[in-house]
Image (tube, helix red, strand yellow):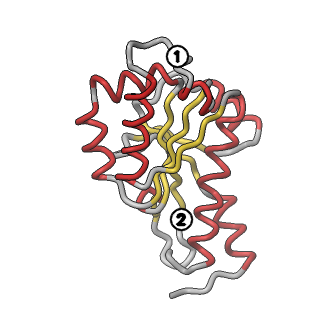
Amino acid sequence: MYKYTDVEIKKIIKSAIVVIDSREKEISHILGYFDRQKIAYTHEKLAFGDYTLKIESPNTLRQFYLQDICTVERKANLEELSGNLCREKERMDREFLRARGTIHLLIEKADYKDLINGKYNTQYSKEAFTAQLKAFEARYGLHITFLKDNSYSGQFIWQTLVYSLRESLIQGIF
């Protein structure tokens, strides 16, 4: 186990590149945040999740992906999530089974109250929707975050990934 110095950790974090799954759509609000904050990003096909980090280890000069430690799966709203759970449940099961590490499920333009009160535009009953989401949470250890104002999504994604990377470096995982 290598013990990184604080200077090395800051350097690694500064050089981190956000990897966005190439199938992600309608993300101008997220890219806008990255651009304003001068956060480097690239688009690549990810095996699971929508966002992770790519870093270069100063010890080996090889690139590593944070995907096995932390990923963010983003849903634009409850309607998109409902459609995935109703029509693509098996695909989501397979994706979450392939996933390793912590999966953060970010649900934009909604809060928990919207889910519980059925404030979404689908035929999925609020009881069934909540039960399925809670089952996925328990089954796959999902960390679910509702973010009503999606203008904070870029910041949420960046901070979630960076602090996971930072803790992994402190613990000597890389």
Residue 99 placed where, x, y %?
35, 53
In the image: residue 24, left or right of residue 35? left
* Residue that numbered label 2 is attached to: 56
Task: Determine the residue positioned at 74% across, 77% down.
Answer: 6
Q: Which mark is residue 47?
A: none
Mark 2: which secondary structure?
strand
In the image: residue 89, left or right of residue 144? left
Task: Determine the residue positioned at 71% across, 28% down.
Answer: 151
Residue 5 placed where, x, y %?
70, 82
In the image: residue 58, left or right of residue 82? right
- In the rendered structure, which amino acid carries the disc numbered 1? Tyr
Mark 1: which secondary structure?
loop
In the image: residue 133, left or right of residue 152? left
- Where residue 165 sits, quadrant-wise, is bottom right
* Residue that numbered label 1 is attached to: 120
Marks 2 and 1 sit apart, C-alpha to C-alpha, by: 42 Å
Residue 159 placed where, x, y %?
67, 51
Mark closer to the chain start, 2 or 1: 2
Q: Is residue 79 above or below residue 42?
A: above
